[in-house]
Each structure stands twice: as C-alpha cells, then as structure tokens.
Image (cartoon, rainbow, N blue to C red):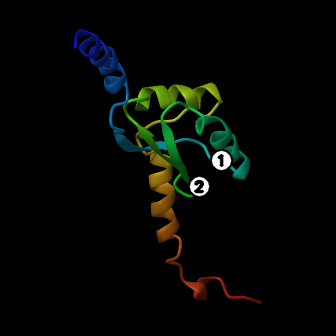
Amino acid sequence: MKKILIFLLALLPMAAVQAKPNKQTVVLYCDLHCQGCCDKILKNIAFEKGVKDIRFDMEQQAVTVTFDANKTDVPTLQKAFAKIGKPATTRRPESAEHAEHDHHEGHQHNHAEHPHP
C-alpha cells in the first residue's frame, strides 16, 4: 500500500505540468510591406513556444496571434517579433487609423472639377 501511495505522489507533479491550455489571442501591429514580411513572421513566430495560429491583415498592418498563455505571453511574442526585425505593438499605429480614414474620404471628390479629355 505504501508503494502505491508513493507512486501516486510521484505522478502528481506530472499532472500539474499538463495544465489545461489557456488559449488567448492578441493583435500585434507591425510593418507588413509585402507577402515576404508575412512569410518571415510565419516562418519564425509559428515555432515560438505556445503559438497556435497566426493571421495577417496587411491593410491594417496587423498580425493576430493565438497562443497558449501557459507557455508564452505578449511581451515574449513582442521580443520574438523584434528579434526578426519586425518590432510589434499592441496599439494600432496612428498612421493606420489615418490611412483608413483618408481612404474613405478620398472617395468623395467631384469628377466635374477634373474632366477627362
């Protein structure tokens, strides 16, 4: 009986290590100039411990990363982005906000002012 109890106690730390995944998602903003930028991030960040999924929005300059918070966190992910030359922030850059705003305003022009020859 004593041997069984010791055996069960020895297994307890193993059970604690296999904690339930704590899936979280963060949107990180960084410069995404082309598909090569996305490929570089995918090639490197996908193999960071705990990363489960990576999605890109080039128009918004955003990378959505789903990860297991038991294995990594946002600052660690940001360090991994910086390491590959793609510093990332959780705050949306003002330039992206202005670009979206300007894009929508840019459609309001009067074609009569610029007649086609």
Image disc number at residue 72: none
Q: Is residue 35 above or below residue 107?
A: above
The residue beneath circle 1 is 38
Q: Are marks 2 and 1 in contact (CB under 8 Å)?
A: yes
Secondary structure under tag 2 reads loop
Quadrant housing the C terminus? bottom right
Q: Position of residue 80 (x, y in %)?
A: 56, 28
Mark 2 or mark 1: name the one nearer the start of the chain.
Answer: 1
| Residue kind at label 1, given as amino acid type | Cys
Q: For the residue labelled by badge 1, is the local secondary structure a helix, a strand or a loop? A: helix
Disc 2 versus disc 1: nearer the observer: 1
Note whether 78 is above or below 95 in the view shown: above
Residue beneath the point at 65% across and 30% down: 85
- Percent coordinates x, y for residue 62 in the rendering: 51, 49
* Residue drawn at 59 percent across, 39 percent down: 46
Looking at the rendered structure, which numbered label has been put on residue 58?
A: 2
**Mark 2 neighbour class, 10 Å CA radius: few under 14, some 14 to 19, many 20 or more:** some
| Residue 16, image x, y percentages | 31, 24
**In the picture, which quadrant includes the N terminus?**
top left
Q: 9 or 36, which is in the foreground?
A: 9
* Mark 1 nearby-residue class (10 Å; few <14, some 14–19, many ≥20): some
